[in-house]
Amino acid sequence: MDRLRTVLLVSAFLLAPLALHAQQALLIENVTLIDGTGRPAVQGANVLVEGDRITAVSTDDVEVPSGATRIDGTGRYLIPGLMDMHIHLSGGRGPGGGNDQTGIRALHGFLYSGITSVYDAGNNPDYILGLRARERAGDIVSPRIFATGGLVTVPGGHGGGGGATLVDSWPEAKPALDAHIAREPDMVKLTFDEHGWGTRPLIPLLPPELMGQVGRYFNEHGIRTTVHISHEFRARQAIEQGINTLAHPIIQGPVSEGFVQLMASTKTPMVSTLTIGEGYSRLVDTPEFLNRPLYQAIYEPQMIERLRTTTRDEYAARTWTTWMKVMTPVAQENLRLISAAGGVIVLGSDQSAGPQSQRELELMVAGGIPALEAIRVGTLNAAIFLGKERELGSIEEGKLADMVLLAADPLADIRNAERIDMVIKGGRVIDLSKLDLPVNR
């Protein structure tokens, strides 16, 4: 009955165009609040939203504006909107430079999965920055889009294909960097990986000193940096050169105690990206995960069939699949050690599908990170990665009202983060039934 009452209230809210235009106040009352800060859950909380901001969070009664929509949170759990800080949005390599509809469907899948912000860590610049402009203008229903555009690397370096900004000397690199800056990236991603590990051949490596000069140049223009690494030695060099964040975990081997303490003391955010490697063996060994409701709701039927058959066969034949199956537990333990020491781990899937963002939470918890901390990893820590922790990432007064109402307790089972009753972005309830997804066709 409570859930039915919520559905009726939200339906009335969504069907009132004038109220939506006026951004009427919204009260979620008597809910169990998991605010994203890592503090323990609070029962019987009331959260008031006015406009796009949270204006009150209290276990006491709050003063509610006339005409506010009330949502009964009894038996439900409220978390901040999840944030995936490493995606590569699908559709960017289509004819003419990109297929917006492919990207929009993927963005709808993120929303349906409770992801209210994404950071695209490398794509066709025209494509992803165009979608970012449409999202910010309110022309499309989408999570908040933050984007790099193209990558920055040395000629022949990792990710140095079309759209990348290529640098090989200083100060000769400045005009190319100025052109990159003119497109107003939210962050800039560099790549610092010579490969030669797993089954990858060696490739040119961005010189550390040049990486530092490039990173400082972006910082001087108010733009944060992240870097693709996979090895502790390269991660140390990136930190020493002043790069702000790390785009991946250490996966080439166990981290040293010294590196764990370095990550804890510098608070350098490190993105998790476990699913990109684990996904190969997961599909080969346990393809039944595709039967889960979230995957059935978002993945196109023909995609599911392809994954079950040809893609699974391809993965089973790859040496890479075996290598990543062995090394993913190493990366999980590396993340656990850094998190336990006080380092800043951040949710990122390195993919373009909301269910994989949720899988990232599962893998972190399976690797020993407590569920309460995993929620912070996917919310406030993600905002710290962006440098936007004053605006996003937790349910606190004054912050943007990006929230997800869950039907079950994610602290009891992190998979309950998939049991989504409602998604709110900027104070507006997203009508999940109108998203362009298989579940709605």
Image (cartoon, grey):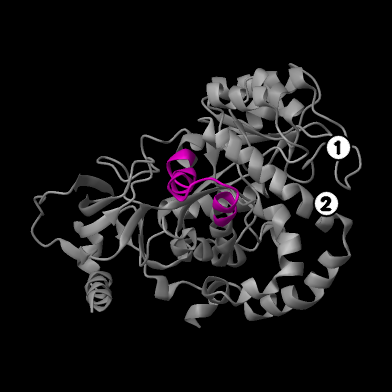
Question: Of label 2 and label 1, which has the lower sequence position?
Answer: 1
- Asked whether residue 179 is in view, the answer is yes
Local secondary structure at mark 2: helix
Q: Residues within 10 Å of mark 1 (few under 14, many from 20)?
A: few
Residue at the spot 58% in from the left edge and 59% down from the top edge: 359
Answer left or right for 136 relative to 313.
left
**Vertical relation: 176 (above or below) 424:** above
Q: Position of residue 244 (x, y in %)?
A: 58, 27
Q: Position of residue 166 (x, y in %)?
A: 77, 33
Q: Nearer the viewer, residue 28 or 134?
A: 28
Q: How far apart, in angstroms, are the residues tagged by discs 2 and 1?
A: 24 Å
Residue at the spot 57% in from the left edge and 48% down from the top edge: 129
Residue at the spot 54% in from the left edge and 64% down from the top edge: 104
Indicate whether residue 366 is drawn in magenta: yes
Answer left or right for 136 relative to 1.
right
Q: Residues within 10 Å of mark 2 (few under 14, many from 20)?
A: some
Q: Quadrant of residue 4?
A: bottom left
Picture disc at residue 156 = 1
Q: Quadrant of residue 178?
A: top right
Picture disc at residue 323 = 2
Tell me which amino acid carries mark 1.
Gly
Tell me which amino acid carries mark 2.
Trp
Magenta stretch in the rendered image: 362-381
Residue at the spot 52% in from the left edge and 71% down from the top edge: 294
Q: Position of residue 128 (x, y in %)?
A: 60, 51
Question: For the stretch drawn in magenta, what is the main secondary structure?
Answer: helix
Answer left or right for 124 relative to 292.
right
